[in-house]
Image (cartoon, grey):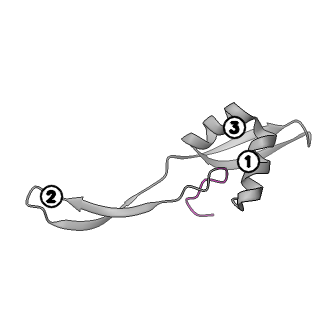
Amino acid sequence: MSKICQITGKKAMNGNNVSHSKRRTKRMFDVNLFTKKFYWPEQDCWISLKVSAKGLRTINKKGINAALVDAAKKGNL
């Protein structure tokens, strides 16, 4: 699986390294991803997700069930 958050859909971006002399070379801005296990009480099981730091905050705010439903609607799961 690639570097994409399964809750928010965030993925790596590309940009430039800019040196002191203003030379530009390509670089990647990776997402702050964690592989984390969550207990899903509605299904009575543990699931493993790749989530970003913002995705963790979303799960803490909404709950795991609501976050998974929203992610499925967006097509992130």
Of the residues shown, which amino acid type is indicated by label 1?
Answer: Ser
Element assignment for label 2: loop
Query: Which numbered disc, 3 or 1, marks the residue closer to the eye?
Result: 3
Marker disc for residue 19:
2
Q: Within the image, what quadrant is residue 15 found in? A: bottom left
Q: CA distance from mark 2 to mark 3?
A: 39 Å
Highlighted range, magenta: 1-7
Q: Within the image, what quadrant is residue 64 found in? A: top right
Residue at x-position 58% and y-position 58%: 4
Residue at x-position 73% and y-position 35%: 62
Label 2–label 1 contact, CB within 8 A? no
> Residue 30 vs residue 58: left or right?
left
Mark 2 or mark 3, earlier in chain: 2
Label 3–label 1 contact, CB within 8 A? no
Q: Could you tell me if residue 77 is visible in this image?
A: no
Identify the main secondary structure in magenta: loop
Query: Disc 1 designates what residue?
Result: 48
Vertical comparison of 58 with 30: above or below: above
Q: CA distance from mark 2 to mark 1?
A: 40 Å
Mark 2 or mark 1, earlier in chain: 2
Of 54 and 41, nearer the camera is 54
Is 8 a magenta residue?
no
Q: Quadrant of the C terminus?
A: bottom right
Q: CA distance from mark 3 to mark 1?
A: 13 Å
Vertical comparison of 19 with 44: above or below: below
Query: Disc 3 designates what residue?
Result: 59
Q: Residues within 10 Å of mark 3 (few under 14, many from 20)?
A: some
Percent position of residue 46, x then y: 82, 42
